[in-house]
Amino acid sequence: MKSYEGKLLINGAWVDSVSRKIEEIKSPFDGVEVGQAAVASVADVEIALQAAVSGAEIWRRTPAHQRSAVMLKAAELADQRAEEIAQIISSENGKSLIEARGEAGRSGEIIRLGAFEGAHLYGSSLPLDANKGTGLDKIGFTLRQPVGVVVAISPFNYPALLVLHKLAPALGSGNSVVLKPARATPLTALAIAQCFLDAGLPAGVLNVLTGSGSELGDALCSDSRVRKISFTGSTSTGTYITRIAGVKKLSLELGASSPVVVLPDADLELATRAVALGGYINSGQVCISVQRVIVHEKVKDDFLQALKVRVEAIKVGDPKADGIEVGTLINAKEAERVATSIRVAISEGATLITGGELDGSIVSPAIVADVNPSASIAQDELFGPAVAVSTATSVEEALDFANSTPYGLGSGVFTRDVDSAIRAAREIDSGIVHINWTPLWRADLMPYGGLKASGIGKEGVKSAIEEMTEVKTIILHGRNW
């Protein structure tokens, strides 16, 4: 058993929860126990916040080059432990080892990016003499400083990457963190925290609480000592956080129903290859997964025929088996929910082209065609391995359908026409618009976040650092001369 199993990280040490309660973490594939996690309570929240307040004072006064050195060491350890972390991801999350290794392999790079960007908190000079009535006797400039205590609440679907997209910018820019990872996948977060601990991160700078999101989340988000909340999860939970948070900075990366528009002049080989990847990676449990395809009626049949061949070639099964590309959903309940959504769509008039079969926590990759754009499978976030295909009769109608949901996180458009590409880029209401690819693509350095019900604020390490720091204006007043 690892030193962190069944423990909380508080003030630089792995400790028991106040209640000493622990729970088993089980594989969603076969139900076998893969580890243990502590069940924290509100009493543990108080201890962790006290430690984080002290840690924030230490870390903000640590020179950037020293912070960077610690983080670079943590990145090196994450690289060395990439296979171990990948095995943990696959075991507790159910994604294939192919995907888990890809996720773990990016961990060190995100930490390095956080170290670099966090060490370069540039301000700007202010041309005060341009203001009428002000001469050359004053100099003004801005400084950035860390906000203080950051609460990071991460989901289960990318238990390494989405943890690090919060930790790396927060720690790199001099903040302390209280991390609450998803209850279903805490072991990955604990393994990552161990990398920072072994790299020499001072006590209190990173604290990790595992357990109930509702119990711990309320206590963490409403506390006035917390100056920033970074949350990834459902729109309903994000809305609730805005009601209880009080006066503090918020970054909320919430739900989605991401569209892909396929126009008559699209490269169908490229489009179907991209959708076959973007709709089913991680069993569709990705905010920017392709959930909806809006295809022009002129190419609908050719598109569906080519997509069906690609989707049926996807290898599904035991996440740890060789060659498996898509594993399980996070649990059997979620798999049943997705399968039910597919059945409801069919009962409402849609056509099942392939897939949708339920086997424990696995749902075979599905294509559902002839979907009314107002149907629930298109409007509501599915978070599962199914793509809903609707038909449009014009570019205008396709773009209207793309904007027809409450969400606006990511989108994609396939076209060879520059005019159509520019129009789509300007008119689709989503935080990210991909031309000739699907929404399921992300560079760790780019701004990442949605419009409408998909959230507020931006992730991506540089953007997150801007949101995890405060800007102060400094004015030096000289005597008139």
Image (cartoon, rainbow, N blue to C red):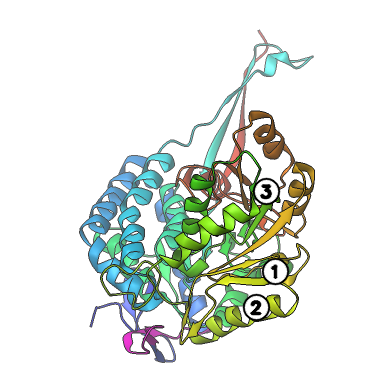
Q: What separation in Å lies between label 1 and label 2 (alpha carbons)?
A: 10 Å
Tell me where the magenta segment starts and ends, as one range: 25-42
Classify residue 18 as left or right of residue 104. Answer: right
Residue pictured at 65% horizontal, 78% vertical: 341
Residue 223 appears in the picture as rendered = no
Q: What separation in Å lies between label 3 and label 2 (alpha carbons)?
A: 24 Å
Q: What residue type is labelled 1?
A: Asp
The residue that disc 1 covers is: 380
Up the image or down, 408 lies above or below 92; here it is above
Q: Which of 421 and 86 is in front in this view?
A: 421
Sooner in the amino-acid sequence: mark 1 or mark 2: 2
> Are discs 1 and 2 less than 8 Å apart at CB?
yes
- Residue 406 image offset from top left, x and y in percent: 75, 60
> Are discs 1 and 3 less than 8 Å apart at CB?
no
- Crowding around mark 3 (Cα neighbors within 10 Å: few <14, some 14 to 19, many 20+) is many
- Residue 88 image offset from top left, x and y in percent: 31, 73
- Residue 473 image offset from top left, x and y in percent: 62, 33
The quarter in which the C terminus is drawn is: top right
Mark 2: secondary structure: helix
Camera-side mark, 1 or 2: 2
- Residue 414 image offset from top left, x and y in percent: 59, 43
The residue that disc 2 covers is: 341
Sooner in the amino-acid sequence: mark 1 or mark 3: 1
The residue that disc 3 covers is: 430
Q: Which amino acid does label 3 sit on?
A: Ser
Up the image or down, 371 lies above or below 105; here it is below
The quarter in which the N terminus is drawn is: bottom left
